[in-house]
Image: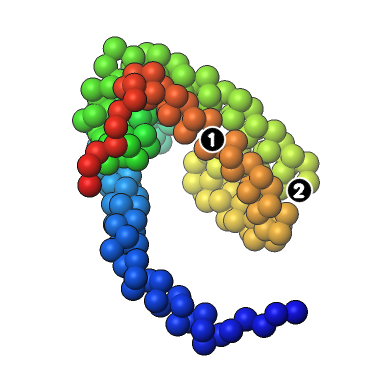
Amino acid sequence: MSKIPVVATVVASYRFVFANYLRLLGIAWASTAITMALLLSMVILGLVFLGITLAVTLPLTIGIGVATAAKEGPHPDPTAIAAQIRAYQPIITAVIYAIMLFIVARLAFFLPSIVLLEKQLGLGRNWQLSKGNSWRIAGLIVMIMLPLLALGVLQLVALAVFGGPDYWALFGTPPASLIASRDMMQFYLRHFYVLAPVALLLYPLGYGPFLAASAIAYRAVAGDVPPAQD
């Protein structure tokens, strides 16, 4: 069997790097810029989500608490107020998710294609491209999510059958939700050698439909947009 010339390989490697330094720098700069643009866009979008969540949750929670306190009279029971707020929590959550779905449709759905092809943060561009298609994009996202949600439920059922933790408790109130989170982490750590390959196999199903739909919809709306000049 032929032997690898170690010293010659090292010298050739460095010769290649220095001979093609500007090209490699251009490739590295472009890929890094695209990655950073996408990450920055997602960070900004996350801050928008956080702001919307606070803007919706705080007023509604305070309003429900005040209304319950007024109903209880001059000496309201804090337990009753907390129970009333928990009772309205699903409504508050539904409102937040509906607003987030709208934000994703208007600000984020085309981001991967915009960042890769047009090399910009893309939030404003996404708003421009999604104009007149908000409901179509929202419906598209929901339709893509339905099979994935069904797959997620099947995963939870399968894990429960094999002795997994009570995942439904994650959506409860503390301390039950915290205990469920601990049990879930311990379960994953114990069985990572099985769960990691399964997660890897399911990875394309988790992200592929969204990215493919985004690219196809971008092509339909924006057409053949030439890449931005470096």
Q: Which residue is mark 1?
A: 208
Residue with the most extreme bottom position = 7
Residue 17 location, x and y as percent? 38, 71
Query: For residue 112, what is the image quadrant?
Result: top left
In front: label 1 or label 2: 1
The one of 135 and 17 positioned closer to us in this rendering: 17
Query: For residue 218, what is the image quadrant?
Result: top left
Q: Is residue 221 visible?
A: yes
Residue 126 location, x and y as percent? 28, 28
Q: Which mark is residue 163?
A: 2
Q: Label 1 to label 2, Cα distance in Å?
A: 30 Å
Q: Residue at x 53, y 24 (%)?
A: 144
Residue 124 location, x and y as percent? 21, 30
Query: For residue 150, what is the image quadrant?
Result: top right
Give the residue type that dot 1 points to. Gly
Estimate how packed mark 2 is, as few (under 14), some (14 to 19) or many (20 or more) residues with alpha carbons within 10 Å: few
Q: Are marks 1 and 2 in contact (CB under 8 Å)?
A: no
